[in-house]
Image (cartoon, rainbow, N blue to C red):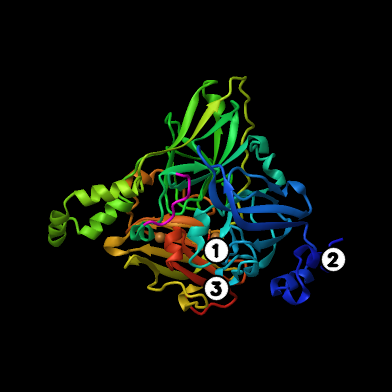
Amino acid sequence: MWTRRNVLQALGAGLAAVPWPLRAAMAAEAPDLVLRLTAAPGSARIRGGGDTAVLRYTGQVLRGRSDALRPSSSYLGPTLELRRGERVRIVFRNRLAEPSIIHWHGMIVPEAADGHPRFAVSPGGEYVYDFTVRNPAGTYLYHPHPHGLTGGQVYRGLAGLLIVREAQERAWGLPEPEHDLALLIQDRRFTDDNGLVFKRMMMDDMNGVLGDTVLVNGVADAAFRVTPRPWRLRLVNASNARIYKLAWSDGRPMRVIATGNGLLSAAEGVQTRPYVVLAPFERIELLEDFGTRRPGSDVALVSRRFSGLGMSKMMDGMMGRGGSSGGMMRGMMGRGIEGMMGDMMGPGQGEELSVARFTVATQARTAGQVLRPPPSASPLAQARHELHTGIAFRHMRGFLNGRRFDMGEVADDERLPLGEGTAWTFANDGGPMSMPHPMHIHGVRFRVVERSAGDAPEDLRDGLVDTGFKDTFLIFPGERVRLLVAPTEPGLFLYHCHNLEHEDGGMMRNCRFDACSPAGRT
Ligand code: C2O
Ligand code: CU
Ligand code: CU
């Protein structure tokens, strides 16, 4: 039996040192699963040549199903395989040289288990999370969330997948776990001796850190051998700042069965796209029938070129291209500096990149089951309240309604009523420095109900999937995006830009979900 004494022994902590969340947790019902995740320095084989010094999560199952943690490749943390309805306790141990805390991205958990930066623990410290898995089957993530340090910690290796499974998935006709493959996509830059290169210049804070090497599941030049049958592919962007325009090299369309926060319902159906746009920490699941390709053939997953974002547009803004003074500045500096910076920075946002290669095994084709997606997910309440957030980017930093992150502050326009629908409009009118921002809200799953003032670039528009429930969405310069959200967990949560350098730079705010919200009532 898991007694309070066992817990203390397992933690190796004296009673006086027991933090309040643990004391609260010990009073709660015994969990089905007790896991331990430790963040510590390590090394990993990422590409040819020597090993790379990284930070990594390692894990142990202390109690319950031993298959709740699945080892992952390279530096990535173990994949958490959770079942809907399970009561989970996770003990986080910080063995880094700086503060940290884990956030379960996309998961709806109590405030104390959300990994808000105010819960960050010092080196040597521990934090205990208790939550029941309420999210539906889907692809989620875990990653660090200490304020100002998230980007660096994620870049050096701290991230992992969290998969929620439900018993009905088989009945819905989805491929079994053996034909279920997650591709966690990140970009990194290396020194000649395989060290990771993080920020190098001021531009990195502005654009977010971009790498020149795409890693899938922590390795460069990822290649998979797949059987000729339908596969469930979970595409996960865990890059600090890079936006991918993912497509098949042979031009086949992509069949989307899930967006960030769960499967598309029967009413929403399979969404077919020529390519899919995946912003940092967004996820999309595809149903891909490799049986429709010739056995022995190869197909690549690529990120196609797109224009109008990131550096070139930024340079236009900075150099005032189109304006007279900018013209002069440009005349003085010439094209040289931009070319030079392009080489140093490259490949910029929107460059063509290869992501992974798939080889179809030479064997008989297996047909898949008929897809019977879950019936309509619970409809969100009608919007009875309105909230508005203006996004601006100036002096290299992002602002939300003119404010930057303050650990203890919640403004009146950052409160949402619990259990009631709110229409939350984000407007990205950031002026000349405006750029796309992947916006994320903790503790909720929402619907994108409208995009207006449409500035979604033409070469990205067809790859946006606004159907279904999401927790992260991309907003383009000049755009307005309206969400419908109805929080169910009371407490202090966060919303922020998930470009990790923007987030660390303070483009993040608290938001409070509580029973009575004086602001925004209509
Ligand atoms: Cu994925 Cu606040 O984070
Ligand atoms: Cu989150
Ligand atoms: Cu941003």
First reached walking from the N terminus: tag 1 or tag 2? 2
Q: Which residue corresponds to the image point at 20% horizontal and 59% vertical from the top-left? A: 320
Q: Are marks 2 and 3 in contact (CB under 8 Å)?
A: no
Helix, strand or loop at label 2? It is loop
Q: Position of residue 318 (x, y in %)?
A: 24, 60
Magenta residues, start to end: 193-200
Q: Amino acid at mark 1?
A: His
Q: Amino acid at mark 3?
A: Arg
In the image, residue 519 lies in the stretch drawn in magenta: no
Is 398 or 201 nearer to us in this picture?
A: 201
Q: Position of residue 438 (x, y in %)?
A: 44, 57
Q: Which residue is mark 1?
A: 145
In the image, residue 195 lies in the stretch drawn in magenta: yes
Q: Amino acid at mark 2?
A: Thr
Is 86 or 62 nearer to us in this picture?
A: 62
Q: Which residue is mark 3?
A: 512
Helix, strand or loop at label 1? It is loop
Q: Position of residue 402 (x, y in %)?
A: 37, 73
Q: Which residue is mark 2?
A: 3
